[in-house]
Amino acid sequence: MRKILITTPIYYVNDKPHIGHAYTTLAADVLTRFFRVQGKEVFFLTGTDEHGAKIAEAAEKVGKTPKEICDENSEYFKKAWQNLEIKYDYFIRTTDKRHEEAVKKFVEKLKEKNVIYEKEYEGLYCVGCEKFLTEKDLVNGLCPDHKRKPETISEKNYFFKLDLKAVKKLIKTKKLKISPARAKSEVLGLLNQGLDDFSISRQKKRVKWGIDLPFDKNQIIYVWVDALLNYISAIGYGDNEKEFKKWWVDARVIHLLAKDILKFHAVYWPAMLLSVGIKNPDEEFIHGFFTINGQKMSKTLGNFIDPNDLVKKFGAEVTRYLLLSQFPLSQDGDVKEEKFAEKYNSDLAQGLGNLVSRVLALGEQYGKPIMLQFSVSDLIARSWNDYKKYMEGFRLNDALATTWNLISYCDKYISEAKPWEKINDEKEFQKILGSLIYILANISLMLSPVMPETSQKILSKLSLIDISEKEWANLKVQLKAGEPLFPKIN
Ligand code: MSP
């Protein structure tokens, strides 16, 4: 079976993580867990982007060296992922020696293939974006994203000969699948409109914090070339051919990212790989952007949600659910802080938590072992089909909605069947409660990628922990009421 490599962008360490970064990383974690349950071998890669003017500038502002800022802030990212129960396989830092060596090797390859040339260039550079902008991109003379005036830069750099035709072919033939469709048309639009060759280096006298260009000591490698190469340096490009073959060449490679960095991933990166004859990623999924009250999240605007604060308030499991369930992954979403508590109460305290409590209380009241009943197996099979289709299509919130439909089904079934009136009708009570336990066990399994601990907790309350589904038939479980899983909050 084909192995899977799932990646997130590597995040800039000029600042600490916010829920936007958490969104991508959580989605990658959930998909990794989902694919593993399906029996697939998965490698989940994330990390931090640590070179360039943006980082150097952030360090200078607080009177630290770039290295100090990188060490400190990359730890914040690691800590945040740990707090969110995100389990990556490898955390790459672009200041790792191993990465630096791989980048140099790749750039030498570009030279060997004769796809770079020297050129004098003048352009408007935004350090916030770490890219050149055109006059057309500006709003009132400022970068619309960073609200700052770009610098006019005129210098001699090395440029990469961009073969747009080859990239177009790659995307049109679906060798590189870009989804959702909106993102794909945006890329095709860019390719049709035409893009200039891009510089792969910067003059060292302007930007010092980076990797030396091996064949010109006056230049350092452009931070985006350095950053994109993390996807292959992390898994052995340049120093471990066997691993590289296993997790890149032969694997299904999926990049997750948002639209802010689409051009780099869907045009520049494929072009770079094509030019040296390395296989391209198989898929790029472009997810939506969180805004807060319609505004881009930023420290300066003071509308920055720290995922650690959510974890403090709700715990990791609930935060994972709340961040992933509110919007389709493919669409933008305006986050409202008050919505978190509302959704917690409706979906978790009243929805899932209440259902678990009711089933356990009924079981305790009955007092005898209950046999699982499979009368609703059609409904369960259909739900699993939908759930898997949604997960595979990056529709995480729809997969969750499918799970929550089963919760609603159980609630309705309980109100209609009134099991509390049938506690002495052995056959009827066994049928009702046995069915509820069976559905709830399936709900727990569906929950496991998003809420791994909750899933285990419910299975354990149902006395089904570590019992495979094959063994569910003929199994008798005895239930005991317990503390509510999700106490209501104000
Ligand atoms: N360092 C580059 C990426 C290099 S990858 C080879 C970079 N870093 S970043 O810190 O700005 O991260 C951008 C990514 O973070 C987005 O593409 C997205 O994955 C995530 N998000 C950042 N803000 C976000 C939102 N407000 N909403 C959703 N995701 C967001 O660009």
Image (spheres, grey):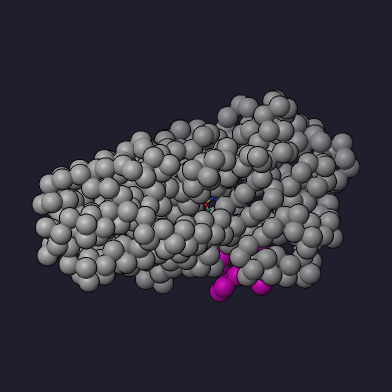
Task: Please say if 56 is above or below 346.
Answer: above
Q: What residue span does the magenta drawing correspond to? A: 133-143
Q: Residue placed at 15% from the left, 45% from the top?
A: 368
Q: Residue placed at 71% from the left, 27% from the top?
A: 242
Horizontal relation, residue 302 to residue 182: left or right: left
Quadrant of the drawing holding the N terminus: top right
Is the stretch drawn in magenta largely helix, strand or loop? loop
Name the residue nearer the viewer: 116 or 429. 429
Q: Residue placed at 76% from the left, 44% from the top?
A: 279
Horizontal relation, residue 293 to residue 204: left or right: left
Percent x, y for residue 255?
61, 50
Task: Please say if 423 is above or below 235.
Answer: below
Percent x, y for residue 115?
86, 46
Horizontal relation, residue 365 to residue 160: left or right: left
Percent x, y for residue 400?
41, 60
Q: Residue placed at 15% from the left, 59% from the top?
A: 425
Task: Please say if 433 is above or below 217.
Answer: below
